[in-house]
Amino acid sequence: MKISFNTWAYSSFPVWVPSYPLEVVIERLASMGYDGIEIGCANPHAWPDHVSPERRKFILQHLKNNNLAVSSMLPAPGGGPGNNPSSLIKEEREFAVKHYKDVVRLAYEWECPTVIWVAGWASFGMPQKDAWNYSREGLAEVARYAKELDITMVVEPTPVDSNLIETADDALQLVEETGESNVKVMFDTIHALYRNEVPSDYVYRMKDKLHHVHISDNDRLPPGQGYGNFDTVLKALKEIDYKGYLTMEVGFHTRRADPDWYAQTSIDFLRSKLASLK
């Protein structure tokens, strides 16, 4: 298993400043010994419309110079113009699908194999079935585009943030209904903790379809700083022979957070735990 860090903690999404240039984040994470970086696709890092061809080439070379791979990319699920693929507004749904394709293209240019699908949310007065169908249709369209670039789309249950894909079974069902071979599932430990579920159960439930994992303790703390049981999560991942990334998605809920502390504390904890598994 490899260790990655999501850039939200170093960016201005979803809360305002401070934020750091992507090349600075790459350097800091590489110096801590991370294998990968999960790039959040919001400014100042990777809103596709704002990343010029020259900068795309520069960032790819900077990644290579720092021996850091892009583990995954995560589109910004809301804010700004809106990116809800399940929106009751047709124009927003169309924008979201186009935006996802732009993210997939950027992922391809940065040699990233995985893009996360944030399935969206049902708005007031809207049948949840309609929101589900819109998300499924959008995901299928984006997945077909991603397949041509050899990129996998992963569906994440997000009950902390939304109301559509809330459980492991929800994610697995959406994947099945989408019917595309390059659509898999992932989970974030904080969402399981939010539902008072056991995160390791998600590993066993998702198993063969599990392609990516987010690690976070309660309240977006580094693992080991809250009440999450990460011994059982890592044991379960080893049992199913998971070989993907453990991506820290922590420290972006408040600007009182020091992103370097979150990143260093997270990797120190996981290195120790993974070493004990061998």
Image (cartoon, rainbow, N blue to C red):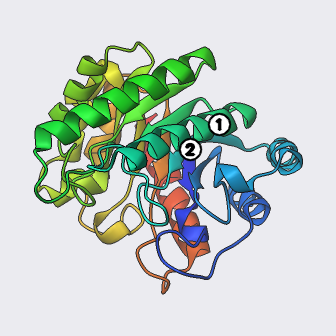
Q: Is residue 208 left or right of residue 46?
A: left
Quadrant hosting residue 94: top left
Around disc 1, counting alpha carbons within 10 Å, would you say few (fewer than 14), some (14 to 19), or many (20 or more)?
A: many
Q: Residue 25: x and y, percent?
A: 71, 63
Residue located at (54% from left, 17% from top): 147
Around disc 2, counting alpha carbons within 10 Å, would you say few (fewer than 14), some (14 to 19), or many (20 or more)?
A: many
Q: CA distance from mark 1 to mark 2?
A: 7 Å
Q: Residue 196: x and y, percent?
A: 11, 56
Q: Which residue is mark 2?
A: 73
Residue 207 - label: none
Q: Residue 206: x and y, percent?
A: 26, 27
Residue located at (46% from left, 70% from top): 14
Q: Which residue is mark 1?
A: 107
Say whether residue 195 is visible.
yes
Chain-order first, disc 1 or disc 2: 2
Amino acid type at mark 2:
Met
Q: Are marks 1 and 2 in contact (CB under 8 Å)?
A: yes
Q: Is residue 9 above or below residue 195?
A: below
Q: Is residue 59 left or right of residue 108?
A: right
Between 249 and 74, which is closer to the camera in this rendering? Answer: 74
Q: Is residue 54 above or below residue 31?
A: above
Quadrant hosting residue 176: top left
